[in-house]
Amino acid sequence: MKIILVILAVLTFTVSACSGSETGKSKKEVKPNIVVIYFDDLGYGDAGAYGSKAIPTPNIDKLAKGGMRFTRGYSSSSTCTPSRYALLTGKYPWRNKKAHILPGSAPLIIGTDELTIPKMLKKQGYQTGIVGKWHLGLGSGNVDWNRHISPGPNEVGFDYSFIMAATQDRVPTVYIENGNVLRLDKSDPIEVSYRKKFPGELTGKEHPELLKLKPSPGQGHTGTIVNGISRIGHMIGGESARWVDENMADTFVVRAKSYIKTHKDKPFFLYFALQQPHVPRTPNKRFVGKTDLGPRGDVIVEGDWCVGEIMKTLENEGLLENTLIVLTSDNGPVLDDGYQDESVERNGDHKPWGPFRGGKYSLLEAGTRLPFITFWKGHIEPGVSDAMVSQIDLLNSFASLVGSDERSKDGVDIMDVFLGKSNAGRESLGIEATGRTAYRKGNWVMIPPYKGPSVNWVNLPTGNAPVVQLYNLKTDIRQEKNVAEENPEILNEMISEYEKLTGKKVKMKLETEK
């Protein structure tokens, strides 16, 4: 009898030790939390893990050292709205004609019937939240900011949303929580226009003496003055609801940390979309002077602090070993992007674009080749991967991870690559920049002929040329030698695949035909 009791006790202990705390599932069966940290205009060379010596980014570097750092990680576009659309839907942005840089008053461009990451995860039992920059439109047109705003993030899969509508340099300059403007006084209603100035509105164009940050000439940042900074567009009302730029990082961090703590008992997805280092660059006083680069460097340090706060919260809540983290950026870097913040004058030897050419708005490599890190304590062995991966693949890869059968049109399931179990990334990739498209395959890049300047208004090379361009990135990482004529077979193959992918025809104009 004693022997039987001892055996039963051992069996009971074994079963208890193998079971989960509340669900009775083993640890292998518990679905991981997923956190996507999305910077805004962070370049390949802006983080220490990718070679920066001028900007201290210890938290990004810690993620890179403890996870998988990708050297060929891409966004789908070199501008913000298209990249965000592609990330959430797993579809190339050119498939949606509305996926271009949006004004703050634009209607929602994600269809409420479209597949998105949060929708897919909700069906698998996930709680879903977004904190930070949205810039994918709100409402159906002619938004009344004084009423509940719909459709928006909540209608495309997010249970919780705390956002700014567009960008920090565009009106409306207010936070929106689950479709409602935060701290709005109904007796001081908000009106927004991107066409006309309101009577009595103070603008940067007419009152430069009121500005603490001067706009750069010719870039459109001369509208409504909020917090001593003139914006793109016009806005009146909502004085109690307007944000203080220098407190924005803290505001978003508080909401993101609260979301994690509140939803820690069930699997959750958090899309944490930072505004750094997008303009206007307004670091909190705690970060002013942390670099020699001026506000642009300082707000990257501030963004790195945000990363650290999320990591500390996950660790303190005992969630690090059950949370997959993806850190990347929406597009490449830019220095003077609308305000006179000494970003050019104080840049020194720092190379935000890393070893590449181009940047924001550009079809060249630095426009879409960005920091891209995956981290999952105890599940991803630290390493560096040269596999080609794209943000457009996150939906399909997450679906594979959580057991969903849903797949997007253009994404690829490369979850094993993100987990460091394989180096077989994408074979090819389409990229976009302000309506122009190009094609990557292996070490090759093909850019069709495009009219327009070779250098844009922010002094970055665009990738435009009157002839078709072909570059071998293995031997020419800066894309300085067009080898289209020397490689006719590769060129024809690239053009054929590009045309099949995009539905666009390429004019075969070569250097000798100029």
Image (tube, rainbow, N blue to C red):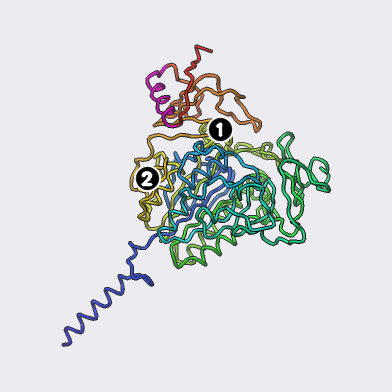
Q: At 61% from the left edge and 24% from the top edge, which residue is drawn?
A: 452
Q: Taking the image as drawn, is residue 221 in sight?
A: yes
Residue drawn where x is 42% and y is 41% of the image = 409
Q: Residues within 10 Å of mark 2 (few under 14, many from 20)?
A: many
Left or right: residue 343 versus residue 116 is: right
Where is residue 368 drawn, in percent x and y?
51, 37
Residue to which mark 1 is pinned: 435
Residue 391 numbered mark, or none: none
Above/below status of 59 relative to 23: above
- Residue on which disc 2 sits: 414
Residue 233 screen position, x and y as percent: 72, 43
- Disc on the earlier residue, 2 or 1: 2
Q: Magenta part mainly helix, strand or loop?
A: helix
Mark 1 surroundings within 10 Å by alpha-carbon count, few (fewer than 14), some (14 through 19), many (20 or more)? some
Tell whether 496 sits left or right of 142.
Answer: left
403 or 484: nearer the viewer: 403
Q: Secondary structure at mark 1?
A: loop
Instruction: Identify the magenta region.
Output: 486-501
Observer-nearest of 497 and 149: 149
For the C terminus, give its image quadrant: top right
Q: Is residue 499 magenta?
A: yes
Q: Nearer the viewer, mark 2 or mark 1?
A: 1
Whole-number angstrom distance, CA of label 2 to CA of label 1: 27 Å
Residue most extreme to the bottom: 1
Above or below: residue 5 compared with residue 193: below
